[in-house]
Image: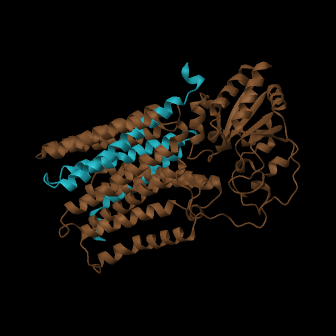
Chain colours: A cyan, B brown
Amino acid sequence: MEFIQNNLEFIYFVIFCVFIGIEIIANVPAILHTPLMSGANAISGVIMVGAVIMILQIPSDNYLLLATGGIAVFLGALNISGGFFVTGRMLKMFNSKNNKK
Amino acid sequence: MNIIVEVGYLIATVSFLGGLKFMSSPKKAKTGNLIAATGMVLAVICTFITVTTNTIPIPNLIIALTAIAIGGFLGKRMASKVEMTAMPQLVSLFNATGGACAMLLGIIEAFLTDTNTTLIGIQILLLLGLTTGAIAATGSIVAYRKLAGKTKDNRKAIVILWSRILLVTIISLPILFFLETLPVNFEMFCLIMALVSLTYGILFVLPIGGADMPVVISLLNSITGIATALAGFVYDNKAMIAGGIFVGSAGILLTLLMCKAMNRSLLKVLTGKFKKTTNTGDTEEQNIKDISVSETVMQLSFASSIAIVPGYGLAVAQGQHLCGQLQKMLENRGIKVDFIIHPVAGRMPGHMNVLLAEANIDYDHLKEMNEVNDTMSHYDVVLIIGANDVVNPAAETKPDSPVYGMPIIKAYAGKQVVVMKRGMSTGYAGVSNDLFGMDNCNLLFGDAKDSLQEIVNQLKLI
């Protein structure tokens, strides 16, 4: 009970996020499901923010952790940049005559 | 200073939401992607602002910036090089990097925090984030290798047995640990959990069949999202939590959608099982009529509206560009050509739409199954290329068929149906197709790409 009391704000936040997320994504037409998925994939690259926060806390003389942290940041950056660029590239191909006017 | 950062994260969160919202129409989707990407850049910049207010360890900063630069550059290169047919592989691969990042984050955080003072709640979150991240990482790599044709399905009983044992281990080990019955410290325990989860990720995807990949990719995508959200709790970072949850819900939604479109439950996909059937349908004698290329061309040129139903076979044959060419030629003759796309056509949700868009086909002509199913009889010719199970009328008429209940494109309702097919083999579900025996149906045997090329060539001459 104490846990719920202390984190009530967070619990509200999570529940709203879940519902808003489902509501918005349910409206995406099937034609755009692949870009949606790769776009969402890129958004999950926000994990890199955590990796950056973490790597800056590592003591500068702990080389093993620093190297691992560097890899984590690299992987996150790869996810973000690759995800958004490839989504952009896909979306560029969706064209319509009505759109070109 | 802190308030600026908080506002920055808030804007980033809203931009993720806005970006996803804009995905609801092809016209606005490009803007949406841009908005989300801008939000992401903002979130990263904010993170660096937070640290400049504290003392900055220079080597760490250099490592972080270099890693971002290399990652960003490599990501752009990979994204600009990939073939559209290889899109599912690439998305899996990027998903693996996200998962691996989450896992490494959990491990390092475990080493950095003082276990005695850290709340047990944080420890549980760390463990959960690390486990989900690890499963998503190796699972996505196996999915990538399968999609690229480098790894075959492995349905051996031993693989399935071990994957179940590991799943039980992943659930029970933390309980034992927090009851303080295990003789290891938290750091060691995190490493052990990471190893077990990495192995489980491999074994979990290994038995899943190739055509079930759309489900698996969606599911893994969702798991990475959840791992991100969990890490967000650890750092008390709302942009991470919200981003992670949006991705998680998108993944779950697509997973269920794909399962429904394939008429299989998630559990059956994950265990690699098919419905057991008594009647596979091939007991009946079918009256198959075949048709030549020139006859097909005649039918097409006399029609006033044509529906093309593309399946995965078309993508395998790399025939999407010929399809585009065919559509242009027919349209120049005043014939309306629509593409009707089943949700599971391709190797990931919506994959076929991307392939056809690449072939310069106007997205107004890309129709969803539900849009046109009631008006299928208006089409003079329905041309089926490389699709099988998704047009099998047995799904509506034969309750004992494995495909029964699956949502299908009612191709049989077209005035004339031409099926391009390599041979008389069955589709993924392993059942014969009742459509082929129908009166209005003709089969054009041969490689899809060769046949399409022939049709295009002959159409030029008329």
Q: Tell me which residue sits at (24%, 40%) in the image.
A: B66
Q: Could you tell me residue B102's position as x and y percent?
A: 34, 54
Residue closer to the observer: A1 or A99: A99
Quadrant holding the N terminus of chain B? top left
Vertical relation: B160 (above or below) B284:
below
Front residue of B295/B225: it is B295
Whether residue A65 sits left or right of residue B295 in the image: it is left
Q: Looking at the picture, how far across and down is residue B337, in whole percent?
A: 71, 30
A16 displayed left or right of B254: left
Vertical order, B457 against B194 (above or below): above
| Residue found farthest to the bottom | B181
Spot occupied by residue A63 in the image (x, y as percentages of width and height)? 18, 53
Which percent across, then down, holds residue B129? 35, 60
Residue found 27% across the figure and 50% down from its top: A51
Q: Residue B28: tell me if it is visible.
A: no
Residue drawn at 59 percent across, 23 percent down: A98
In the displayed structure, does residue B349 sit left or right of residue A11?
right
Q: Is residue B447 above or below residue B257?
A: above
Q: Residue furthest left?
A: B55
Q: What residue do we see at 59% from left, 57% from top? A: B209
Which image quarter: residue B232? bottom left
How many numbered discs? 0
Does the image show residue B349? yes
Residue B99 as seen in the image, left or right of residue B87: left
The quarter of the picture where the C terminus of chain B appears is: top right
Residue A72, compared with residue B174, is above or below; it is above
